[in-house]
Amino acid sequence: METSSTLSRRGAEIAAKSIRDLFKSILKDPYDEKKNPNGFVNMGVAENYCMVSEVAAFTNSHLGFTKLDFTYGEGPWGTSRLRKAMAAHMTKYFNAISPVDPEDILVASGVTSLCEMLGFTIADPGDGVLFTRPIYQAFEPDFGLRAGVKPVFTSFEGIDLFSTGCIAKYEDALRAAEAEGTKIRALMLCNPHNPLGACYPKQTIIAIMQFCQKHRLHLLADEIYATSVYEVDDPNAVAFTSVLSFDTAPYIDTDLVHVIYGMSKDFAGGGLRLGMMLIRNKELMGAMGAVTQFGWAGLPSQEIAATMLENEEWLASFIQTSQKTLSARNALCRSILDSKGIKYQPGSNAGFFLWIDLSPWLKPSGPDTEYKDAWEAEDALTKSLVEGGVFINGGKSLSSDTPGRFRIIFSHPEASLHEGFARLFKVLGIK
Ligand SMILES: Cc1ncc(COP(=O)(O)O)c(C=O)c1O
């Protein structure tokens, strides 16, 4: 019998890359202190868990859909109402130096879709985008899976990637990639950074802008955690600076700077599937607008988002509560880790995660051991944790260059956090 694939070459190539099975095991049986104490504790997926019930309550009390919400509306580019509300939000919360124009905003079904569309519009297959090591794990498939863009990961080897010293490393990475025939098209500035949970100082943002200008690269500023920045008791913490908050003209052409944002994090609305991008480059807006129908955001979601954004009083209180809760969880997470002598990235004051160092707990690797290298030992630890009922992301999946790092999500109710840590420590053999 014929056993060869009936799919296209590209379809056959990606068939084994779906993460559906992983998600099934992590998400199918969620822990709940009272209703499901034996359920799985998912400290791997970055959601604003503590705030989702507020969004649900707001939606239930403030929205009534009309028949228009079940039509194609104004087409795939985003409703005027949502683009206006988002422009006002960015102007206010990103501390924009000049008002954001709703005409410069494109709406799509999540930042995931926007990145895929960017891969298609700013790069040809085989071209590259510069990323830090480590970096949010989905950028690689977002840009690579369909558009065929190569991730060019930059290692910083002892240099703080948030310092201006990062530029020399980006220069090296760009030169090495181009020597191998990979044309670099863009640099991803993930600020606040996922997975490091820290913000870039303004001087580094400027240096990155100058680097992009020199090489004519698009600067993709993913600021999806812009308002999930909070108080921490850590002298290394740096306040968030948006690329919209200062005059960038002396450093880079406005045509090269794009801001990526969405509802999944700051608004605890991952299920809304809404991403927004500020694009002041008319040609890029044209190209992105030509493919948006493949990432068309649903009208009911857009109505929910617009209603949240327009209700300034509710939103201010929501953001304040979210920041307070994240600050408290960050502090709790740090104190638990401190009490067990587990080290973590200094300066983390943003996002839902801490970047922790479990390398002392990796099993031995190398000749005459069970694991070929420390990466295999890290995979084995991730697997043991899943078997122990808790999931955290191993650094390998986040393109870390040092084995043994893990990203731990702390935006959970306290009981889930305590249970997750108890399971983690049990697997690590920490009393
Ligand atoms: C930095 C960053 N960008 C983008 C995304 C994806 O956002 P969306 O849910 O809008 O696709 C995430 C989600 O974890 C993220 O952390």
Image (cartoon, grey):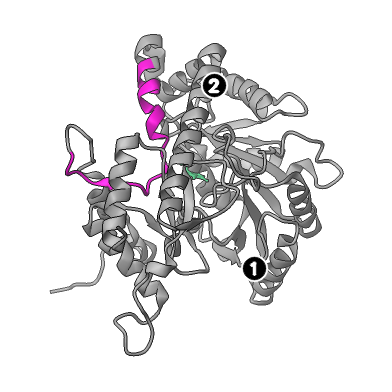
Q: Is residue 402 magenta?
A: no
Q: How many marks?
A: 2
Q: Is residue 38 magenta?
A: yes
Q: Is residue 152 above or below residue 288?
A: below
What range is drawn magenta here?
A: 37-57
Residue located 59% across and 59% down the image:
132
Name the side, left or right, on which 14 lies relative to 346.
left
Q: Quadrant of the C terminus?
A: bottom left
Residue located 47% across and 46% down the image:
334
- Is residue 106 or residue 10 the one in the foreground? 106
Q: Which residue is mark 1?
A: 158
Q: Quadrant of residue 234?
A: top right
**Residue 66 appears anywhere in the view:** no
| Numbered label attached to residue 82 | 2
Q: Position of residue 413 (x, y in %)?
A: 34, 34
Q: Is residue 121 above or below residue 144?
A: above
Circle nearer the N terminus (2, 1): 2
- Is residue 341 or residue 312 the one in the foreground? 341
Name the side, left or right, on which 244 lies relative to 87.
right
Residue located 83% across and 47% down the image:
251
Q: Quadrant of residue 14?
A: bottom left
Q: Position of residue 116 (x, y in %)?
A: 50, 49
Three-letter amino acid code at the position of disc 2: Leu
**Label 2 crowd bin: few (<14), some (14–19), many (20+), radius 10 Å:** many
Name the side, left or right, on which 403 lies relative to 277.
left
Q: Position of residue 113 (x, y in %)?
A: 48, 43
**Label 1 crowd bin: few (<14), some (14–19), many (20+), radius 10 Å:** few
Q: Position of residue 215 (x, y in %)?
A: 77, 60
Q: Is residue 413 above or below residue 361?
A: above
